[in-house]
Amino acid sequence: MSAGGPVTVAALEERLQHLHLRTAETPLFNPVFQLSLELSRRLEDGSLSLDEVGTLVSELECDSLQSRARRLHRLISPVEAEANGAAIDALAQADSFEAFTARWQRPAAHVVFTAHPTFLLSRAQGGAVAAAAASGDIGEATVCLAPHDRDAITLDYEHEEAMKALANGQAARDVIVGHLLDTARGRWPDQWRAARPVPFRFATWVGYDMDGRTDIGWHTCLRYRLAEKAQRLAAYAVMLADAASDIAGELNRAAAYAAEMSALFAQDLTNPAALSEVANRFTADHGNKLVSLEPMITELEYRAGEADDALARTLLTAAAAMRADGLGMGWVHFRVNNSQLQNAVRRRIDPEGLLDLDSQAALARLRELLGEVKPLRSNLAALAIENSTAIRQFLIMAQVLHHVDADTPIRMLVAECEQPSTVLAALYFAKLFGVDGKVDVSPLFETETALEHGGRLLDAVLSEPHYQAYARARGRVSIQTGFSDAGRFVGQIPAALAIERLQGRLSEAMAANGMTDVAALIFNTHGESMGRGAHPGSFTDRLEWPLSPWSRRRFVRAGIRLEPEVSFQGGDGYLFFGSPELALATLTRMAENAPSLADADAPVDPFYRRTDLSLDFYRAIRRVQQRHLNSATYPRAVTAFGLGLLNDTGSRKSRRQSDLAADRAMNLRQIRAIPHNAVLQQLGYPVNVIAGFGTAAEGNYEEIRALLQSSARGRQMLRLVRSANALASIKTVAAFGELFNSAYWASRPYRGGEQQIADACLLLAETFTTDDRTGVFRRLASRLRVDALKLHRLIDPMGDEAPLAGREQMRRSLGVAQALRLALFQHMFIRVVSVPGFSRANDIAREDVWEMVFTLRIEEALAQLRRAFPTSMPALGDFTVSEPSDYPDSGASGYQAIHRDSIDPIEQAWKLSLRIGLTIANEFGAHG
């Protein structure tokens, strides 16, 4: 980028590459911040406008969307339907019909579409990325047509997107079922009609997860569940329109009735009379109130036995879909947390609040309750007046099972579960409301404490006679493991290894308690980024990272059937099901590496045999991660900008509300795991993936290197760390701190240059003399650099088995994006301190507005500035007043100039910075 020459992305990348050469002269030189300074100077002298910056941002954004489409295509290719059909045909080959049915009558996996706030791309952008990835035609003309405008993300928006993903998944599964039936017909022409394939099941918790939310009412859950029923029944009717028109008619009538019932729950039900009317209509018997598909499935399979091959194929495909999904778009997951359950059960066992609910006495009392519990009837009135979140969930389930779908199981996920009493409390309420025959209680192991002591909890729960009887009746033991908080608090690699160990402990506990006759349902909830458990190397790595071959073999060798469940979280996860073609490719890759299967005779991976090395390695990584977390430096750096670096990506709040003073002291427990990881992406260094891996090998590089290279699990870790390191930039981390460097601002106009901003620079220099953020970022960068040097000592002698294509170009592109954003931040800083003084209002002073901008609480800052400097106010001509007035005259100018020169540029720069944030997240592959 020559002085005064045109500013293009290519010129900026070339300039950044040249600046990097100067680090050989002075190691402390920061090319990213230097480029941001050069851009800032051009912004301030007027030779570069914000509109021109917008053009640069659009180009970077376009490149990142293409990168996103290429990544998606790479992970699930081949995408062509013919290739995936051939792959399913090959997988369907079996030595006998019995072997075929044993393989395909149980799902290879359950696929769960969650409500996590990762709706980074707008609908238009996501659609363009999905279409390009599906076609393989990935370029500016196919990917970059969508406008950059953000969508307003509501719960209804999220639910609609989940339903689209589910519908595409169902269509893809129908294709797979068709191939399975065709294979069976060709191999076993006299038996194939007896095949009952269920290759995959689907589920969702969008609209049912009340953990940490107060905006999902009981009526919301029923409205969604009935709408899902209506949608699925209508789809079944389409499948059978020609093959069984009478059944299709019945399904259409039932769909219309379900839609009518759903609409009832969209109205205001606070009035008892209104609720009573709705309740009576909802619970009344009706000819179209279909609550079980079992008779219909039986009829379809009977007709298939009498029909010709083509008609039988259609009938059996529809029956397979019904068997998999029931009267809904898939199974549903409700979720509560430990506190909500304990508060509810305390009313039953300890109304005076004197008993420790984690004590043996409480456990004994729960056993008594489970032994004497008698189911209670409930209705919508009881649901409406219930104030306990946990009990409300069970009451909703009772209504669903009685009046919506009597066949399909429901999951009750229990977050923050660290005591056996929590699981027994959930079981008690399931029995109390008569839903224990259809509800699977599933404790979540995600916190550091839960992972450390989870094995003992499983031993205790599985030894309880009441739980054993319940699990046998349900046919499964259900647990959930989580990679988000685990990865945040102990690091992603230690989290994965701790979860893997917990999965092994489950197999041991089931075997020790004689429960090998039931299945182990393990729901691994990981995100879409490497920082939250989605391995970016390949789709095989993605599947094996949360449920490793070692874990799978533990169950196979114990004779325990495994029911694995995997998550696709929010909008980023739904991209894998963004079209029927993508969904088919995704499911085919999952079938090729079915998480439910394992080779029991596979040799032991050295990583698990050499525990003298691997256990110490794990513990050392974990110590480094905990050292970061427990220091004052790392949390302060992560929260230095609040959450202002991030786009709004979901309907759920990313953190609790706080005032300005609290914002200055925000800690990591105030923000959720997704924004925490997203901030690390934006700062340019995935600390929770990389940190500690090199330090853990210190003093033993050769042995650790040999272990990692000889181990499939070790090589998988290496691929993860290399993928993260390819995107990481310690110089970028350090550059953020320089924004708060008082000496930098004092020096900018020091030699007589940039006099037009000299006063603003002086104000910033004075303000930041007592600011700690420069030192915080420098200390963090220093610690990361030391660890990174050790990482390179460990991994550089080893060849990279999966080098990232275009790595250096991507790093330059990220560097340019970061420099542009830092220049925009400097512009915002300069503009806000250039605003004239104004009167204090609502306890907010001018300096408070500055701090809002420094921490990127821009919407709040703009609101305060517009309050102080209004441009919309009455004019003389608006009044019919008889007395003349010469005032206001030409000397009484308004505030338009302040808006033009400061307020409007701040808003424009902020919006551009958020688009850069999207660009960076795309290069990392996902938000958070």
Image: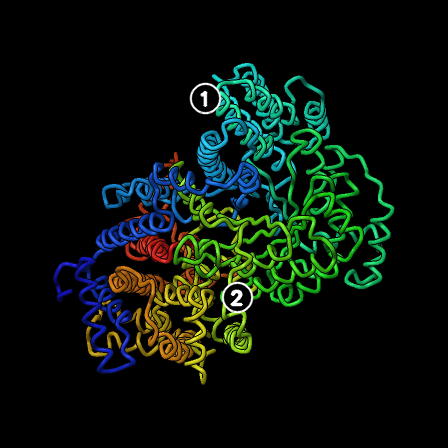
On screen, residue 886 above or below 663: above
**Can you identify the residue that label 2 sits on?**
604
Residue 369 in picture, x, y percent from top left:
85, 50
Asked which secondary structure carries label 1, the reply is helix
Residue closer to the observer: 798 or 452: 798
Tag 2's secondary structure?
loop
Q: Quadrant of the N terminus?
A: bottom left
Q: Is residue 607 above or below residue 399?
A: below
Badge 2: few (under 14), some or many (20 or more) residues near its Cα, within 10 Å? few
In the figure, 74 relative to 275: above or below?
A: below
For residue 339, which quarter of the picture?
Answer: bottom right
Answer with mark 1 or mark 2, whichever residue precedes in sequence. Answer: 1
Comparing 468 with 37, the one in front is 468
Residue 103 in sight here: yes
* Kind of residue at badge 2: Val
Between 537 and 290, the one lying in front of the other is: 537
Kindly tell me whether residue 171 is visible in this rendering: no
- Residue type, label 1: Ala
Above or below: residue 620 compared with residue 641 = below
Q: Which residue is drawn at 12% across and 61% down?
A: 5
